[in-house]
Image: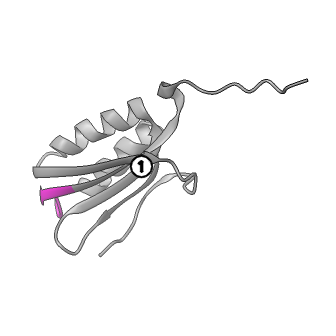
Amino acid sequence: MKDSVSCPSKTEDVVSLEVRVVGRVQGVGFRYFAHDLGRRLGLVGYVTNLADGSVRAYAEGSRQALEEFFRHMERGPTGAHVREVQSHWGWATGQYTCFRIDSGR
């Protein structure tokens, strides 16, 4: 007798999104903005400042939640000026259990 395996639908699959946000994104609360948003959306991963003045975020969760996360990264918090958002979609690693702020640089 074969085991019955149920595969989740595409919308339920856990995937990853890595973004690099360029512009006036440091010193304006961008990491806290991304952190709060990630937690509200039920994502896991991290956000960090990079030495070149950009911000990197890596998040895992449902594609729908990550798409919403991406839309907010394109705008950023009040005071930010987002010039460019580079993104890379992939499979989730499962190594994160929460969404955190890394000190970076």
Q: Label 1, on which residue? A: 59
Rendered location of residue 66, percent (x, y): 37, 38
Whether residue 82 appears in magenta in the rendering, the answer is no
Q: Is residue 22 visible?
A: yes
> Which one is in front, 23 or 63?
63
The residue segment tinted magenta is: 21-27
> Which one is in front, 20 or 76?
20
Secondary element under disc 1, as helix, strand or loop, is: strand
- Residue 5, by quadrant, is top right
- Residue 1, by quadrant, is top right
What residue is rendered at 24% in x and 36% in y? 71
Rendered location of residue 89, percent (x, y): 36, 46
Rendered location of residue 31, percent (x, y): 29, 57
What residue is rendered at 17% in x and 72% in y? 52
> Which one is in front, 38 or 90?
90
| Residue 99 position (above or below residue 103) | above
Q: Is residue 25 left or right of residue 103?
A: left
Q: Is residue 83 left or right of residue 73?
A: left
Q: Is residue 24 visible?
A: no
Q: Amino acid at mark 1?
A: Ala
- Number of numbered labels in the structure image: 1
| Residue 41 position (above or below residue 34) | above
Q: How is the image coloured?
A: one colour
What residue is rendered at 35% in x and 42% in y? 37
Q: Is residue 10 left or right of residue 33?
A: right
- Residue 30, by quadrant, is bottom left
